[in-house]
Image (cartoon, helix red, strand yellow):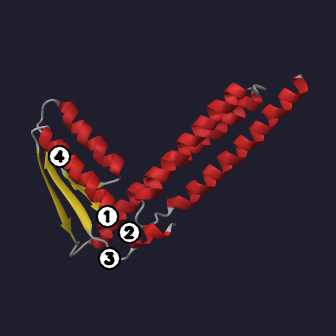
Amino acid sequence: MTADKAPEKSESTGWLVLIYRVPPEPTRLRSTVWRRIKSLGAIYLQNSAAALPASAATERALRKLRREILDMSGTAILLSCDVLAGESDVRSAFQAARNDEYEEIVDRCEDFLHQVQKEYTANHFTYAELEENEVDLVKLRNWFAKVRDRDAFDADGRAATERALDECEQSLEAYAARVYAEEAESQ
């Protein structure tokens, strides 16, 4: 955890709530808004009411999304508020959303490890495969960084995800060593 993240992780977190309505047609507008809200890590309190812990970055992102909704001929209101009752429920929902994302990354890490094992089984030790696996690991790490950045309350799944990514890193290093060894033998 970096020092600049500490204020966002305090016990008394305010929330930003975006309440919106998007025209029913074309349907792509609704899916665009839904994808943007999900990519920000917001949780839905109910239909068309999404919440995020308050921070300067989330406020900028939600203001931008509000503008986009208005440009779609929709309506949108952005509120800054405190939860008077049910704060633990909102936090729990937010934590559950982060844990779901962490779990999905762990699942992809398992896929990554199976892919590397498949290369061993096939005795396929090439620079092209190594590069492909390196790219895949970078994608996993970038995805993790995005989830970690929006994990305002340190969800439980973070540690397991870090361990899974470390295991992927170790597996890739072992595979790289084998690729280099195979190259040395072929020369």
Per the image, the residue denoted by label 1 is 55
Eye-nearest disc, 3 or 4: 4
- Residue at the (38%, 69%) spot, across then down: 8
Is disc 2 in contact with disc 4, using a CB cutoff of under 8 Å? no
- Which residue type carries mark 4? Arg
Left-right relation of 72 to 140 = left
Vertical comparison of 127 with 48: above or below: above
- Residue at the (58%, 37%) spot, across then down: 136
- Which residue type carries mark 3? Ser
Q: Position of residue 172 (x, y in %)?
A: 70, 41
**Gap between marks 1 and 2 measured at Cα:** 7 Å
Per the image, the residue denoted by label 2 is 8
Tell which circle, 3 or 1, labels the residue nearer the N-terminal end. Answer: 3
In the rendered image, is residue 112 in sight?
yes
Quadrant of residue 58 in the image? bottom left
Left-right relation of 111 to 69 = right
Quadrant of residue 135 in the image? top right
Q: Position of residue 96 (x, y in %)?
A: 40, 59
Is disc 1 in contact with disc 2, using a CB cutoff of under 8 Å? yes
